[in-house]
Image (tube, rainbow, N blue to C red):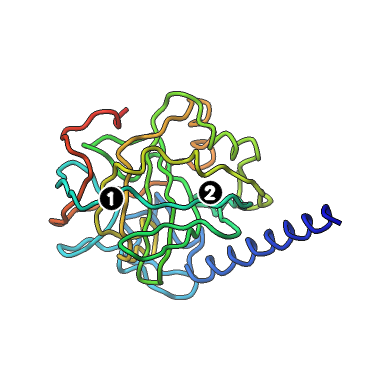
Amino acid sequence: MKRDFALAVLVCALCGISAHAQILAAAAGVNADDFAYSGDKGPGFWPELHGKDGKEFSACAPSPSARQSPIDIETVVEDPALRPLDVSFVEAPFVMKNLGFTIQVTPAFGSSLTLDGRNYSLLQFHFHTLSEHTVAGKHGVMEVHFVFRHSDTDFAVIGMLYRVGRSNAFLKTLIDAGLPEKTTSADVTVKPNLEKALTDSSQYFTYPGSLTTPPCSPVVTWLVLKQWAELSPEQAETFRKILGNDFRPLQSPNNRVIHSTVRRWPFDGGQP
């Protein structure tokens, strides 16, 4: 009886993941055919393109008032009011899917972030190689984005950069489960330990920005962790072979202020 109940719970959770992933895809109105990272659908052409639902990507265009991401993190302002990130990760099954422009990992339920008194639910996390943000002009070999949603116009994204070093237990779980190499690959169910995913969440940079893929909506509070994570050369190569170069070029900061918990600049411990 207990075994049957547990199986039923797992099946329901996986059904929930599938439905949730479909809702997210429909809401985004974007698929791998709509844009690219090179050629005539590359970043320079994004403002002229549109999604499958006809939605234009005009927000991707540079302008003196644009609030686009990613940016280089160099000049920062220490903000004593910033507190450690209040993240609650719930152990749950996730589904990995190759979207053609990234590997996206979607939870069944549960994880959240509390920021400025508002609750944000974890929608998904995904990867970019190289990193999209840079620190003092330096790229990481990869960057992970944990995407949290409060409303359609209010997202918070935790970004964490990687450098080559020791093997990463969190990434090993994903790789061992079998990263989907193509869009035609079957979705993969995995149960990662997200508590092992992040480095020090009390030290970070924050600024107002945008989604880094079309439609580039300027609806994101970015939270970029100071401390970079490590991954082994083999792990870095595994992701690179699948993702290629799926990073958007740096955007103009346009006088935006980057607030920081970091008390020293230049700081140490984060850069490769």
Q: Nearer the viewer, residue 213 or 12?
A: 12
Residue at image position (40%, 37%) is 199
Q: Of callouts 2 and 1, which one flags the residue occurring earlier in the amino acid sequence?
A: 1
Which element is circle 1 on?
loop
* Number of marks in the rendered image: 2
Q: Which quadrant holds the N terminus?
A: bottom right
Amino acid type of disc 2?
Ile
Residue at image position (27%, 48%) is 250
Q: CA distance from mark 2 to mark 1?
A: 30 Å
Picture quarter containing residue 181? top right
Amino acid type of disc 1?
Arg
> Label 1 belongs to which residue?
83
For residue 47, side relative to residue 189 (left or right): left
Q: Which quadrant holds the C terminus?
A: top left
For residue 81, side relative to residue 213 (left or right): left
Q: Nearer the viewer, mark 2 or mark 1?
A: 1
For residue 231, side relative to residue 255 (left or right): right
> Label 2 belongs to which residue?
103
Question: Relative to 222, is 75 above or below?
Answer: above
Provide residue 117's location: percent of width, then percent of height.
Answer: 33, 64
